[in-house]
Amino acid sequence: MIKEQLASLDSINLNLGGGTGLIMSIVLALIMFGIALGIKLETLKNVFIHPKSILTGVLLQWIGLPLVTFLLIIALNPVLTPMVALGMLLVASCPGGNISNFMSSLAKGNIELSVSMTAVATVAAPVVTPFNFWLWGNLYLKFASLSDTLTIPQLVIPFWDIFTTVFIILGIPIILGMLCAHYLPKFTEKVKKPFSIFSIVVFVVMVLGMFIPNWQLFIKYIIFIFLLVLIHNACAFGTGYLGASLMKLPRRDRRAITIEVGIQNSGLGLTLLLNPEIFKPEIWNNPATGILYGGMLFVTAWWGIWHIISGLGLASIFRKSKLPDNE
């Protein structure tokens, strides 16, 4: 029953309007520029002097979450469809989300560590994101083809196209933002906070703008996607917290890493999905090939909404929990 419902998602085309991919790319670039305004070389230097925390966080982000996601979709394979599973892997392959730094601050976490993780994950995203999606996606499809009577097409990802897109959307704004913060410190201090608020508001409005025209479809399928994303997101937070706890990191560092790993840049995932040069329509959304990726879009889009709710909730819980005096 559940698998049939999820399978019906694949053939549904979300009403996203013309130019949505371009608008999302611009909005994400603005958000990353705003984040970079708060990244100072001194901040990065202080974190890397004692690298245990950031190495733990980055490894949990790059290896831990994709691995946990892979194990999760294997466990849920009897009720998942390939496109929904690939949507989960795409989200797990993206760098940390664009509001994780704000949430870490709200949670009284290590904001320097949070910003540094965002910087490292974002700078490496042009390489790490396509590689992880290619690696875990192909491993999953090989598993699914052995355990399913259907023949599932091989996953082929244009690595260079994804690298170029991610670098333009994330890499260039990060570099420009850091240069601005370094050479124009007074100007940066004046615009940093209002620009960050503006970019986050624009992002939320953009997500709602995508949701509203498709609300009937979301209402119809929300129970299945909601539960799936809820479980996946909880596993992401759990991966961050458990990994940081096993490494016996300070509480403030655990909070920052938990939020960084649990808040994924699903907006980047949507941008990649909507890029016809990467997910070519003649291959990925063509009834003739049998590959319809509506399930990927649904999972990725709902992640963009849900992780804001769950992240703010978790940050509020952390904030109410008193830290030891020595931290």
Image (cartoon, rainbow, N blue to C red):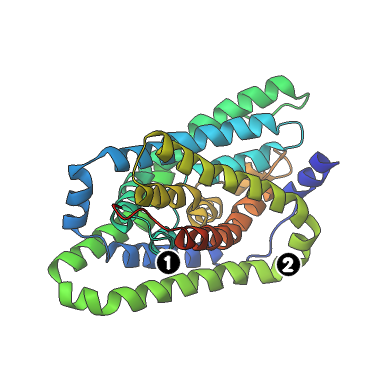
Q: Residues within 10 Å of mark 1 (few under 14, many from 20)?
A: some
> Residue 292 bears which disc, if any?
none
Amino acid type assigned to the residue bearing label 2 in the image: Trp
User: Residue 33 appears in which quarter of the rendering?
Assistant: bottom left
Identify the residue at image location x=70%, y=53%. 226
> Relative to residue 39, is residue 103 drawn left or right?
right
Q: Nearer the viewer, mark 1 or mark 2?
A: 2
Q: Quadrant of residue 287?
A: top right
Residue positioned 32% across, 58% down in the render: 111
Looking at the image, is 92 positioned above or below residue 325? above
Q: Residue furthest right?
A: 1
Query: Secondary structure under badge 2?
Result: helix
- State the quadrant of the N terminus: top right
Percent x, y of residue 45? 17, 50
The residue closer to the viewer here, 104 or 168, is: 104
The spot of residue 86 in percent (x, y) is 61, 39
Left or right: 180, with 58 as reference point: left
Q: CA distance from mark 1 to mark 2?
A: 24 Å
Q: Is residue 169 left or right of residue 307?
A: left
Identify the mark at residue 215; answer none if there is no mark.
2
Q: Is residue 290 above or below residue 271?
A: above
Amino acid type at mark 1: Ile
Image coords of residue 327 (percent x, y): 30, 53
Which of the 4 image quarters holds residue 153? top right
Residue at disc 1, secondary structure: helix
Q: Residue at x 63, y 57 (%)?
A: 302
Task: Decide: few, some or many residues near mark 2? Use Cα within 10 Å; few <14, some 14-19, many ≥20.
Answer: some
Residue behind mark 1: 26
Residue at image x 78%, y 23%?
149
